[in-house]
Image (cartoon, rainbow, N blue to C red):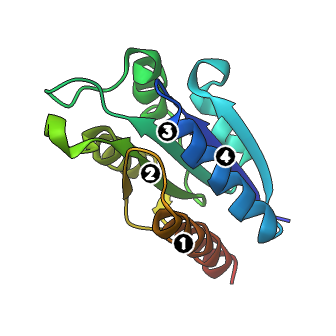
Amino acid sequence: MPRATIVYASWTGNSEEIAEYLAESFQKLNVDVRLSECQQIDAKDLLDADICVVSTYTFGSRGDLPDEIVGFYFDLEKVDLTGRVFGATGSGEEFYGYFCKSVDDFDKQFEKTGAVRGAEPLKIELNPSEEDEKRLDEFAKSLLDTWEGLKK
């Protein structure tokens, strides 16, 4: 059974809600899931996962990473995740500009680890709508399909 680790940073609860929904999507696909708040996990813990996902928000009008996930972000660059699949998702609000920039930042950071992108970055306005939940289901399926493809 494949293992997924989802790491999240959430201020308003939206990115946590995304992470929780994604965990449920993975469980429906028979994936063993670990869900961790970003300050409760080390980047090297991703070595225990087949599929690695970050769900985060973007802080401020300049598109900054949230303070609580900065350490994880920089530690991630030092971990060799070759043979694993990654995805980046999160919430934002277009009103502030730099919509979901932290999602893009994590997508680029994961690329440095040697992991394979299993899905395009998924950006969600505020909390997930029913349409966003369908997109999250597709995101989870794409990540799993990519992992299965690597195993062939």
Residue 115 image position (x, y, % from top left): 50, 56
Residue 123 image position (x, y, % from top left): 36, 54
Q: Which residue is mark 3?
A: 14
Q: Amino acid at mark 2?
A: Ala
How far is mark 2 from mark 3, CA to CA? 15 Å
Regarding mark 3 in the picture, which secondary structure is present there?
helix
Q: Which residue is mark 2?
A: 88
Q: Are marks 2 and 3 in contact (CB under 8 Å)?
A: no
Q: Residues within 10 Å of mark 4 (few under 14, many from 20)?
A: some
Q: Which residue is mark 1?
A: 134
Q: Is residue 151 visible?
A: yes
Q: Residues within 10 Å of mark 1 (few under 14, many from 20)?
A: few
In this rendering, the label closer to the viewer, 1 or 2:
1
Among numbered discs 4 and 1, the one appearing first in the sequence: 4
Residue 141 image position (x, y, % from top left): 61, 74
Residue located 22% across and 23% down the image:
60
Regarding mark 4 in the picture, which secondary structure is present there?
helix
Q: Are marks 4 and 2 in contact (CB under 8 Å)?
A: no
Regarding mark 1 in the picture, which secondary structure is present there?
helix
Residue 152 found in image quarter = bottom right
Query: What is the count of numbered marks?
Result: 4
Q: Is residue 39 above or below residue 132?
A: above
Regarding mark 2 in the picture, which secondary structure is present there?
strand
In this rendering, the label closer to the viewer, 3 or 4:
3
Among numbered discs 1 and 3, the one appearing first in the sequence: 3
Q: Are marks 1 and 2 in contact (CB under 8 Å)?
A: no
How far is mark 1 from mark 2, CA to CA? 16 Å
How far is mark 3 from mark 4, CA to CA? 10 Å
Q: Which residue is mark 4?
A: 20
Residue located 53% across and 31% down the image:
13
Left or right: residue 110 versus residue 6 is left
Camera-side residue: 23 or 53? 23
